[in-house]
Amino acid sequence: MCTREGVKLKDGGFISASTVVCTIGSRPLPMIEQLEIPKDKGRIAVNADMSVSEYQNVWAIGDCAAVTNNWTENYHRQPANLQKDREPR
């Protein structure tokens, strides 16, 4: 558990820290697999504005969206809180 003073471990130990960075793996919810929409590596394929190409007024964000980096053309994930201000380019 993370506190203001650091991180408490399962075994009762404690690590003092003023900054804690969490880097856990993520994946889409299982229901995403059931959707009949375009996917890339199990995630919903989206345009630069996070919209789903074949559907009007449908967007995907967070762990379920397959976002393509416009500069490298590589796929990557983005947490939803980083996508809220994303604008089409």
Image (cartoon, helix red, strand yellow):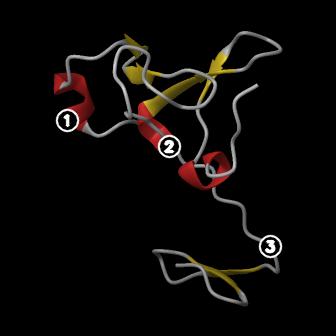
- The label on residue 39 is none
Q: Is residue 18 left or right of residue 6?
A: right
Amino acid at circle 2:
Gly
Q: Is residue 88 left or right of residue 58?
A: right
Disc with the residue nearer the chain's start (1 vs 3): 3
Q: Is residue 63 left or right of residue 29?
A: right
Nearer to us of marks 1 and 3 is: 1
In this view of the protein, can residue 26 be seen by the observer?
no
Disc with the residue nearer the chain's start (2 vs 1): 1
Amino acid at circle 1:
Met
Q: Is residue 61 left or right of residue 78?
A: left
Residue under numbered circle 2: 62
Q: Residues within 10 Å of mark 2 (few under 14, many from 20)?
A: many
Residue under numbered circle 1: 31
Residue 18 position in % (x across, y down) = 82, 80
Cα–Cα span, label 1 and label 3: 35 Å
Q: Is residue 7 above or below residue 84?
A: below
Nearer to us of marks 3 and 2 is: 2
| Circles 1 and 3: CB atoms closer than 8 Å | no
In this view of the protein, can residue 20 be seen by the observer?
yes
Q: Quadrant of residue 50?
A: top right
Q: Is residue 13 above or below residue 5?
A: above
Q: Residues within 10 Å of mark 1 (few under 14, many from 20)?
A: few
Out of 25 and 88, give the one closest to the viewer: 88
The residue located at (34%, 21%) in the rendering is 55
Residue under numbered circle 3: 19
Q: The residue tagged with tag 2: helix, strand or loop?
A: helix
Cα–Cα span, label 3 and label 2: 24 Å
Q: The residue tagged with tag 3: helix, strand or loop?
A: loop
